[in-house]
Image (cartoon, rainbow, N blue to C red):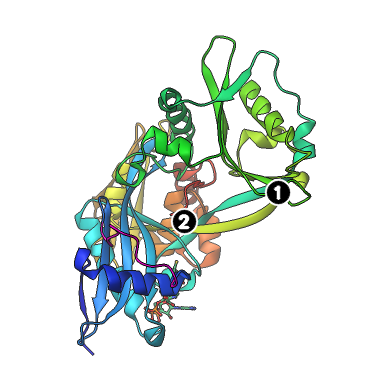
Amino acid sequence: MTYHVRPLGPADRQLAWHLGSLAFGYAEQPVPEGWTPDSPGRRVLGVFDPAGRLVAKADDREQGQWFGGRIVPVSGIAGVSTAPELRGRGLARLVLTRLLEGARERGAVISTLFDTTPAPYRALGWEEVGALVHHRVPARVLAEIGPDATTTLRPATEADLPAVSEIYREVARAGSGLMERSGPAFGATPAQVLAAYHGFTVAVDDTGTIAGYASWNRGPGYDANGRLTVDDLIGRTPEATRTLLAMLGAWASVAPTVLIRLGAADPVWSLVARGDAKPESARPWMLRVVDAPGAVAARGWPRHLTGEVDLELSDDVCPWHQGRHRLVLAGGNGRLEPGGEGTVRLAPRGLAAWYAGAGTPQQLRRSGFLTGGDAGTDELLRAATAGPAPTLHDYF
Ligand SMILES: CC(C)(COP(=O)(O)OP(=O)(O)OC[C@H]1O[C@@H](n2cnc3c(N)ncnc32)[C@H](O)[C@@H]1OP(=O)(O)O)[C@@H](O)C(=O)NCCC(=O)NCCS
């Protein structure tokens, strides 16, 4: 059968809503007024059968994620669905392969997604590099953390949001994979940001400077099932972090459980015993390199590391960067030059995990994603992307 692949527009809204809502379980909801499959910063690619039926689709979101202190242009993939009767026949492969071509043309150098199952994406070169985890902490544990006497808490106002964004960005810049919360996917006004939460609390130090914040929602009821869900709790200082945690603890009588989204290296772990915080939910996320020279040029690299490694990339899905490249690192910058001996051979999933800092060369060799090279190339490649574990706090 010959399928036709094209971007979806406003005229396709019924078809796109039907396919997406059926796959993700909201088929009873009518198409919201004004909803269209495409919107600023979001392109949706659809596959049509000869009868004009939409049989598969995938969304390409324009977003940026921080790696090595720089914002890397990303294709965030969402809404991937194939008509139930046609699954397992290569339609997701078709739409995602075409989506990657388009993403590269618009300047995305890597792609990330939250997977419901890794298999179809692994088949196409994505690899799981992290997970967005909500931890369940008894509020009484947090009640044992005393607030700092010089720090005050108050509800945020719209005027506080630039300072709040800067605190988040400071953390994102020093992390691996955190979202840049600007651009078309983050177009909410300050009023809308505040309205999305029951509580948006800022911690203010004794100089009047905002030193941390927490955004949280209060669940229903005040019995044993009462809970608070905390999206961000970020303190720039230990005093801010502990005072915000103490506020959550003070809910113990009516909301005995706190669900809090935390990365593996969050300073909250210096105040909370890991045994007291059980993972409540984990949403894995995957990464793929879309344009290897572009991806190497875009991220930051360790400033004190200088060296070269010859790579050979295999990649049937993104054939444009297949072949031999010399990785050159100097002064915090990296580049891939064409050519070299192809000493270290990387499969797409190996390239993805290495780029994200989610796998050392030795791990990748043991997984079968990296061959060739020696202890010297392993050491350089390991140091090049070593850093905080890849973390993403924004589900999409
Ligand atoms: C996931 C989904 C989009 C896959 O679509 P599809 O058209 O059936 O996938 P394809 O036939 O193109 O398969 C692509 C590759 O993934 C593999 N694959 C697909 N679904 C798989 C599954 N459930 N388990 C294992 N492998 C799978 C195929 O073997 C194929 O690999 P290959 O090309 O190397 O042989 C489809 O099953 C679906 O719509 N599911 C419900 C919604 C959903 O879960 N979407 C994903 C959100 S992240």
Name the foreground residue: 55 vs 360: 55
What secondary structure predominates along the stretch shown in magenta?
A: loop
Is residue 302 magenta-colored?
Answer: no
Can residue 29 be found in the magenta stretch?
A: yes
Q: Amino acid at mark 2?
A: Ala
Left or right? Give the position of 43 relative to 65: left
Q: Which residues are magenta?
A: 27-38
Label 2 Cα crowd, 10 Å radius (few <14 / some 14-19 / many 20+): many
Quadrant in which ligand 1 is drawn: bottom left
Earlier sequence position, callout 1 versus callout 2: 1
The residue that mark 2 highlights is 353
* Total numbered labels placed on residues in the image: 2
Vertical comparison of 63 with 238: above or below: below
- Type of the residue with mark 1: Gly
Give percent across and percent down for residue 80. Answer: 38, 68
* Position of residue 79 measured from the top left corner of the image (x, y, whole percent): 38, 65
The answer to whether 15 appears left or right of 206 in the picture is left
Distance between the alpha carbons at the discs numbered 1 and 2: 43 Å
Q: Which secondary structure, mark 1?
A: loop
Work out which quarter of the rendered image holds the C terminus and state it.
bottom left
Question: Does 7 sit left or right of 149 as displayed?
Answer: left
- Front residue of 293/197: it is 197
| Rendered image: mark on residue 221 | 1
Q: Nearer the viewer, residue 83 or 291?
A: 83
Residue 189: x %, y % from top left: 36, 36
Provide the secondary structure element on which disc 2 rests: helix
User: Are dots 1 and 2 in contact, CB under 8 Å?
Assistant: no
Observer-nearest residue: 368 or 41? 41
Find the residue positioned furthest to the top. Answer: 207
